[in-house]
Image (tube, grey):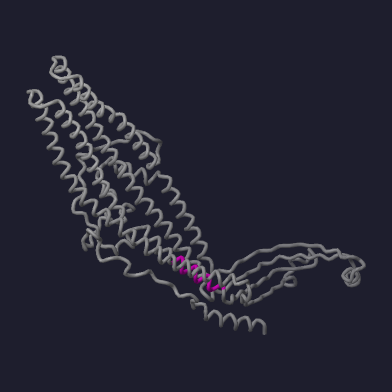
Amino acid sequence: MITRIITYTAAFLLLLSGCTVSKDISTPVNTTPAAFRNGTEDTANIATIQWKTFFTDAALQKLVDSAISNNYDMQVAVKNIEAAQLIVKQTKLGNLPAANLQIGASINRPSDNSLNGLSLSQFLGKSYVEDYSASLALSWEADIWGKIKNQKAKALATYLQTAEARKAIQTNLVADVAKGYYNLLMLDAQLAIARKNVLLNDSTLRIIQLQYNAGQVTALGVQQAEAQRLVAVQLIPLLQQTITIQENALSVLTGVVPAAIERSSELKNIVAAQNISSGVPSQLVSSRPDVKMYELALTIANANTGIAKANLYPSLTITAAGGVNSFKASNWFNIPASLFGTALGGITQPLFQRKQLKTQYELAKVEREKTVIQFRQSVLNAVGEVSDALVKTTKLKEQETVATTRVNTLQQAISNADLLFKNGMATYLEVITAQSNTLQGELELAALKKEQLSAVVELYRALGGGWN
């Protein structure tokens, strides 16, 4: 009769095993605009380009490859994936019963004046009793309310999150290495500009010194020319220091001991990508790893809510044990006489636990709602980053065009001022001013070129490029 009751109860509850006690929240739709500000509605997207194709500089490709292989953040991300894989494999066994092998032996010697002692002496003719047993115990919980199913879904989403986290680290890493490399090329260019200006100032200083010796200019002219020369001279050690620091930073990113960084090109030979395709905002959900992580976080939040709700409902547990048992070691494995078996089925319904289960469920729902908000915020941030990068690539190109024209004009002004000065038609102040303006203009032009390259890299990263 007991067996039938357990069987019928289990069959009834198993019919409910496909039911869900918590309705999942789907990924929010219409969270993105139709197009990026300053962008187009073209669905072509540079994020789909592999980084080895996007970056053509050989030295930069070598640096990025080293960073992906050796960077310690990347290595930790890989280990996180391995750990998540183990958890997924473990949760796949959630529907299987738990099994324990138990072997035990005991001797009990009661008091001679106790009821047990008197009974032993009367029926067994000895003052102690032995007990030897070996059994296999099984325990299985029916997944009536989808708790185990949600645990599997949670583990899988967590694993996928770790994979997206590795992608997110790689996209940032590729962008950081590229921007660091372009910054290094800019510093090289600025160092060359400073050295060229020192030579130019040396030439001007010699002419002014000759004029001073001839009584044509005062000592003030010599001092101002020397001061202008020292401006360029001071830049050289400053730029050399910054170059070394940038090389050290790139070395750390690539996972090697700080050392000199190889360059295979110069800043002036690097051409920023033209006609960049940004695609449409809706693609960010699938292309940006960090946005995808928040989408998976919603899956985890749904699973946690389902688990918390399932804890409020009855649970069916079936246990069984079987083995051999004997009061004498000599008869321990006397089969079938020593065989025994038990089976038990039980339904447990939580009644009063100081409202802990109900509170856990309500907290899970709140956390799920927070996850939806965070997902929406991640999409909004991504759209904003892409829009920022788009306007930078456009406006920095315009600034570079103006700066190039200005530098060309200033370089012509230096030549004219130098020629007029030698013929006595211009003062040394005009020459010094022209040299100072040209130095600043050339330095600014190099910085603008680097900023333009960095803006393209940032757009590539903001769209989700760099992990493939």
Residue shown at 11% from the left, 33% from the top: 413
Q: Where is residue 179 in the image (x, y as percent from the top left)?
A: 30, 44
Predominant secondary structure, magenta span: helix
- For the N terminus, the image quarter is bottom right
Residue, far right: 113
Q: Where is residue 272 in the image (x, y as percent from the top left)?
A: 21, 47
Residue shown at 76% from the left, 62% from the top: 105
Give yes or no for residue 306 being in the magenta stretch: yes
Q: Give the range drawn in magenta.
A: 299-311
The quadrant in which residue 206 appears is: top left
Give yes or no for residue 191 being in the magenta stretch: no
Q: Position of residue 5 (x, y in %)?
A: 63, 83
Decide if residue 119 is on the left or right side of residue 183: right
Q: Is residue 379 above or below residue 26?
A: above
Q: 185 or 121, which lies in front?
A: 185
Q: 335 or 385, which lies in front?
A: 385
Residue shown at 66% from the left, 75% from the top: 343
Numbered label tally: 0
Q: Position of residue 228 (x, y in %)?
A: 22, 27
Decide if residue 270 is on the left or right side of residue 380: left
Q: In this view, does 34 lie above or below 274?
A: below
Q: 100 or 60, which lies in front?
A: 60
Decide if residue 406 is on the left or right side of residue 33: left
The quadrant in which residue 371 appears is: bottom left
Q: In this view, does 463 lie above or below 340?
A: above
Q: 445 or 99, which lies in front?
A: 445
